[in-house]
Image (spheres, grey):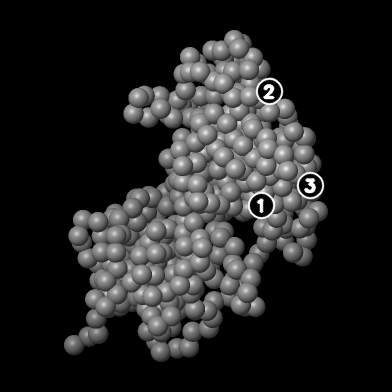
Amino acid sequence: MADAIHRVVIIGGGFGGLNAAQALRRERVDVTLIDRRNFHLFQPLLYQVATGALSPANIASPLRSVLKNQPNTRVMLGDVTGFDISGKEVVLADGTRVGYDSLIVAAGAGHSYFAHPEWEAHAPGLKTIEDATAIRRRVLQAFEDAELHDDPQVRAKLLNFVIVGAGPTGVEMAGAISELAHHTLRKDFRSIDPATARIVLLEHAPRVLMPFHPNLSERARRELQHMGVEVVTGAMVTDIQAEAVTYQRDGQTVVIPTRTVVWAAGVKASPLGKMLADATGANLDRAGRIEVEPDLTLPGHRDLYVIGDMALGRYPDGKTQLPGVAPVAMQQGKYAAKAIVRRLRNSPVEPFRYWDKGSMATIGRAAAVADLYFVRFGGYLAWLAWLFIHLMYIVAFQNRLLVLFQWFGNYLTRNRAARLITEVASDDNPQAGTTPNREMTTQVAPPTRAAVTATPS
């Protein structure tokens, strides 16, 4: 009797899970990929959806389409609610149990509001398509509401945009909103000048883009200032309400009246991390990430791999944590797949080693910074490199072409064709839109001109 085919279950169709599945395409294994969504999302470009440069479909690819030519793989749409470790089964919300011989958990991460979950209602983060379209609606609705008001203070509040966190996501959002206000919308309104919008980037760290070399951080700061973005470093946000953000800096408390806040300051691992830790006895850190062995397995469970934002991985020194970025998840996904195959062949498995190719962040039109270790540069060349690399990482070839044409058109015209408001306010969803008659009574803080700095989220 032939040996049963090894069953590999992968939870999560993000960068880690999808790369693991694709790495197993020629192996004699049965692969089941489980995800709550039916598509793979290219998260690094969500900020362009949030500012109307791209449509959601440009950066998302159906998982079944991506894996349709992989006969050993099936896709299941489902919500994982538990793990039966002894029975080697994954439990779904509808009661379905999926058996496995090897399990790869790559469920990603969500937003962390640092013990203030109530802030989420007023300051959405940027992790999902829904997040991006909600932020797009809020940003565009702010200009629409300002057009309907005559009161200068009300207009000023509506045209204040605050981004919390100056990592790559925060820097990119701040630059994109600045371009939207100063160029794309400049002739669209009759009663307001969109260029009077105030964009404030708040960062608790002493400079922006903290993992980058200080020279690149300084360059990013200057670029943002040139674009009209106020960058406030050393700022600790203490409160976020529906119509104001409060922060402390140098012993002073500052209140910024605003209805539009974007959260880019922190992440926490998927709740599946705690479920898996409870089921296996694994350790969690404060961000909910699971401590893994050098081969990305859980202690005492060589058949359980945790990768991506859920894993507390480290560099070979054993102390420095791996960053929560897409290249780490992609490399870990491929590694986990190869480790499973090597174990099936009774071959030794080497510890995971991350090949850090460097970091890049775009600031705006023809402006970016690149830290590739052997060379550091910024400006137009870095921007072109950023465009090319991100284009190549997009999964579907058709999406690459769509994004390329959109970028080319945006570059020539400064237009953002996807600036659509797709929801309206209602009693059930008051945050979906705003009404010009709503009372607004927060004291306006004077503009702050501070150094530009950022830290990756």
As rendered, which of 259 and 70 lies closer to the eye? 259
Q: Secondary structure at mark 1?
A: loop
Mark 2 closeness class: few <14, some 14–19, many ≥20 residues within 10 Å: some
Residue that numbered label 3 is attached to: 219
How much space separates mark 3 and mark 2, taking CA atoms? 23 Å
Residue that numbered label 1 is attached to: 455
Residue at 69% across / 22% down in the picture? 196
Q: Which mark, by number, is residue 195?
A: 2
**Spot occupied by residue 160 in the image (x, y as percentages of width and height):** 62, 28
Which residue occupies the extreme front position in the image? 251
Q: Secondary structure at mark 2?
A: helix
Residue at 66% across / 17% down in the picture? 193
Residue at 39% across / 55% down in the picture? 66
Q: Earlier in the sequence, mark 2 or mark 1?
A: 2
Q: Is any atom of residue 121 visible in this view?
A: yes
Describe residue 126's horizontal placement relative to residue 167 as left or right. left
**Spot occupied by residue 12 in the image (x, y as percentages of width and height):** 39, 59
Q: Which amino acid lies under the numbered mark 3 shown in the image of this protein?
A: Arg
Q: Earlier in the sequence, mark 1 or mark 3?
A: 3
Residue 269, relative to residue 247: is it above or below?
below
Mark 3 closeness class: few <14, some 14–19, many ≥20 residues within 10 Å: many
